[in-house]
Image: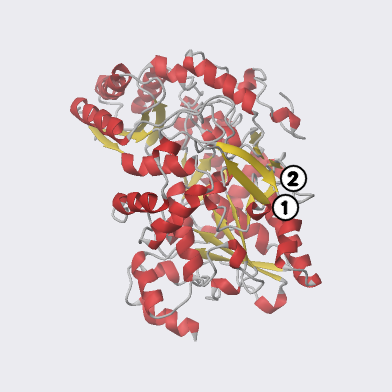
Amino acid sequence: MLKNQIDALLDRVQKPARYMGGEMNAVIKDPSSVAIRYAFAFPDVYEVGMSHLGSRILYDIINKREDALCERVFMPWVDMADLMRQEHVPLFSLESRSPVGEFDMLGITLQYEMSYTNILEILDLSGIPLHSEDRTWDDPIVIAGGPCAFNPEPLYHFIDAFSIGDGEISTLETIDVVKQCKQEGVSREECLRRLAKLRGVYVPSLYKAAYHEDGTLASFEPTQEGVPRTVVKNMIADLDHAEYPESVIVPFMEIVHDRINIEVLRGCTRGCRFCQAGMIYRPVRERSVEHLLDLAKKLVDETGYEEITLSSLSTGDYSCLPQLAHALMERFEEKRVALSLPSLRLDSELKETLEETQKVRKTSLTYAMEAGTQRLRDVINKGITEEDLISSVSDAFAGGWSSIKLYFMFGLPTETTEDLDGIADLAGKVVRQYFSTPKNLRARGLRVNCSASCFVPKPFTPFQWEPQDTIAQFEEKQRHLCQIMHIKGVEFNWHEPHVSFLEAVFARGDRRTADVLEAAWRLGCRFDGWSDQFSFDKWMQAFEQCGVDPAFYANRRREKGELLPWAFIDAGVTESYLWREHERAMQAVVTPDCRKGCQGCGLKRFEGACEGR
């Protein structure tokens, strides 16, 4: 019956392939043959979620279990969501088109703060009570993980349990606990207590927060015996022995990253002070060349894709990158499989590798300079120079590349007008380098895409204490950049400061922002990361309704010693290390890459971390 209802809606919506399922390599299991049915939800549209590597990994490891199945769920676009409500069609999984509310577990990945209203929309469309306290065993256990789970408090009311750290570990452990609890017939509350005893699992209903009169956090304590005061993240020490999909689903429609994605390493040693991922995913762990070549062969055979991306936070830091690139090109050149390298570091030895990757076809090269002057790059510990950029693009232009992307941020701590002017100066120097390259070497059609995003202070970074610029300050800086970025061959774009303002609120929010989130959703907010759906006025109405000042979270400087809402989580890096890095930032002192010597971030407390260094 439900399948017929869904089919009747597909002719009435944009991109019906988002909801069809049945793609090549999708895993179909008999629900009666398993003990646990797991729905994995990505809180954005199909083409975004299907590009997410973490979702592919967890889908694979769950479906490898004989006692469990995993089916995919995505946030339906507004046309489909409205029709589903109108026709009383519940949110459904793609594999079997089963109602999400009938699964035993619902996993949600938290990649971006501006998808939080979509999470409430997913719960409501599924018929799952919004608040954890209102759910029974007739509802799934709702578990969320991902980078945003490192400050789970803005979602505390809506999520039963959070998975902190590498999901390959806790996903399987939580399935074991839920399976045993269902078999034993214990209460849902007892199941949550058992989940809370797992490493890396946070159950918000078992903790209580109190606040000072000035609004800052006074205390955060567990409410029951046996509940840990500190939640320690999960960490996989050896990626070569971690599960990784050897076959992935091939969509019927184009997705954002429509290619094979192979994770060559996890973590980063660079220590950029604005970068949350570089801190929470420490330490660096690499996959061996032999393992990566084996994965690449299996994935090409199983999918037919004609492009492989080597992914990580900084692919150029993979210690065997030239060797791997050469081996991949040698193996797949006849099949015309291209190789792309995102996340390049300018000071990496990449010339030989770039020459390998261009044998099939050239993709654009991306360089994240982040700041326009060396002083500000030292403040953020970027560790690269203008000479690095010019040398790298010089090699690229001489090698036949003509498409370059430059990423910057503005609103960084200690930023001045001179730093903004440096962005335009660097873009201009890249253009001049292209035209100074001999015509017989360079390709036609120079394209320099220069983008500037608004700085958002994030938990577990040395800048977690810093205020964000106000919207007015961001807008003034944008106007200045637009005036000076009229450079032939350069396209300049920027992020919307109103969205970045809300991102900062929820990145550093506490439990009181959960009420604002629910109020905004009830006012109609959803797809807040999409410019054509975002409504800043509705958000401001929600803050007013709840009596919450958003500037308290986004634009306020935290003092040393203030209890932060995420302080109960042990992400590996210690607060003392982060504060030391904050102080060095204010003095524009660079901290070396920890591969050149331990900087005492705290990770060595973890078994298997930083081995060999």
Residue identifier under label 2: 228
42 in relation to 330, above or below: below
Residue identifier under label 1: 196
Q: Quadrant of residue 603?
A: top right
Question: Residue shown at 45%/31% (left/top)?
Answer: 354
Q: Residues within 10 Å of mark 1 (few under 14, many from 20)?
A: many
Three-letter code for the amino acid on which mark 1 is drawn: Ala
Question: Residue shown at 75%/49% (left/top)?
Answer: 227
Distance between the alpha carbons at the discs numbered 1 and 2: 8 Å
Report the side of 143 relative to 389 (left or right).
right
Disc 1 and disc 2 in contact, CB within 8 angstroms: yes
Q: Is residue 241 visible?
A: yes
Question: Residue shown at 47%/14% (left/top)?
Answer: 588
496 in relation to 102, above or below: above
Q: Answer with mark 1 or mark 2, whichever residue precedes in sequence.
A: 1
Disc 1 on helix, strand or loop? helix
Q: Nearer the viewer, residue 435 or 601?
A: 601
Three-letter code for the amino acid on which mark 2 is drawn: Pro
Question: Residue shown at 52%/46% (left/top)?
Answer: 332
